[in-house]
């Protein structure tokens, strides 16, 4: 799995970071605005934001003296691809399973046919 | 995708043996599935069943045209719950095309993802308050928990 996706998955494993991520999903916000809506301190919010930023889920921009945080579409696009890959994995598993099973059944059928032929020949050879 | 089996065989394995080939780590319910079943008719159900016999619905059969086509609805919602409202469901369409006596082409499309919420397909920086991000987020978390369990 892509390292960024993995870090993204880890980053959202924390309830506060998840809450921050959801808040930013609604609108871009500054640190103090985020802290006002959360039961944690401003420095704690900053720390969580750094983790989200490292995971490319969130990005920031300067707005005068404030720093505004928003969701990073690049990270989200990676996630979307990740889900597309889940289907790819499943369909590949289907292909492998179907092909193996088909070969098995073919072999089994061939063997059954041979067995039947042998039995018939045996029956014919047997003296009455 | 090409599968080196006859079309009838491909369709049968896909629809009747899903529990055998679907990756075990990708379950929808809280516990691993014992089997994944598709009722063989339009309007039928698509669901997983766990070891205790509990069922967890994945979707329903929108089109059933063996051995050529099956279209399933996908009802998983932002909170990883299931909403059977068709207006909130995307579609998983599978077409089987015979390319030879032992060769089948499988066409796959997961379409109408936008019905789960605006923004799924249009990955824009400015997403409306409703829809998009929460859906992706929760898909994401569900995948994370599954992968966590799998590893």
Image (cartoon, coloured by chain):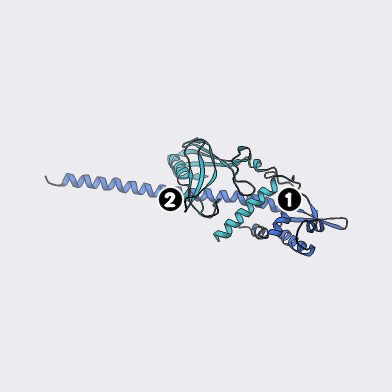
Chain colours: A blue, B cyan
Q: Return the x and y of residue A113 as percentages of the image width and height.
A: 29, 45
Q: Residues within 10 Å of mark 2 (few under 14, many from 20)?
A: some
Considering the image in quadrants, where does the C terminus of chain B appear?
Answer: bottom right
Q: Secondary structure at mark 1?
A: helix
Q: Is residue B100 above or below residue A25?
A: above
Q: Residue at 82% across / 58% down in the picture?
A: A32
Snapshot quadrant of residue B116: top right
Q: Furthest-left residue in view?
A: A128
Mark 1 vs mark 2: give the one in front: 1
The numbered mark, 1 or 2, whose residue comes first in the sequence reads 1
State yes or no: discs 1 and 2 in contact (Cβ < 8 Å): no
Residue to which mark 1 is pinned: A25
Q: Chain of mark 1?
A: A
Q: Return the x and y of residue B140 as percentages of the image width and height.
A: 64, 53
Q: Secondary structure at mark 2?
A: helix
Q: Chain of mark 2?
A: A
- A22 or B101, which lies in front? A22
Residue to which mark 2 is pinned: A100
């Amino acid at each position: 799995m892509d390292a960024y996706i993995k870090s993204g998955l880890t980053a959202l494993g924390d309830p506060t970071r998840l809450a921050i991520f959801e808040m930013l999903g609604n609108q871009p916000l500054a640190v103090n605005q985020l802290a006002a809506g959360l039961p944690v301190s401003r420095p704690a919010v900053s720390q969580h934001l750094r983790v989200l930023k490292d995971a490319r889920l969130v990005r920031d921009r300067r707005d005068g003296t404030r720093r505004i945080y928003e969701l990073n579409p690049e990270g989200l696009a990676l996630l979307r691809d990740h889900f597309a890959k889940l289907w790819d994995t499943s369909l590949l598993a289907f292909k492998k399973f179907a092909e193996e099973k088909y070969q098995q059944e073919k072999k089994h059928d061939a063997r059954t046919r041979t067995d039947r032929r042998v039995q018939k020949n045996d029956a014919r050879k047997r003296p009455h | 995708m090409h599968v080196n089996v006859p079309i009838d065989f491909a369709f049968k394995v896909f629809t009747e043996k899903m529990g055998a080939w679907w990756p075990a780590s990708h379950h929808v319910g809280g516990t691993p599935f014992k089997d994944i079943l598709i009722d063989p008719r339009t309007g039928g159900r698509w669901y997983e069943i766990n070891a205790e016999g509990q069922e967890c619905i994945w979707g329903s059969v929108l089109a059933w045209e063996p051995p050529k086509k099956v279209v399933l609805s996908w009802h998983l919602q932002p909170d990883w719950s299931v909403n059977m409202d068709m207006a909130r469901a995307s579609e998983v369409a599978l077409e089987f095309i015979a390319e030879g006596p032992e060769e089948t082409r499988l066409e796959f499309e997961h379409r109408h993802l936008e019905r789960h919420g605006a923004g799924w397909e249009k990955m824009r920086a400015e997403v409306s308050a409703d829809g998009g991000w929460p859906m992706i987020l929760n898909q994401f978390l569900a995948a994370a928990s599954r992968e966590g369990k799998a590893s």
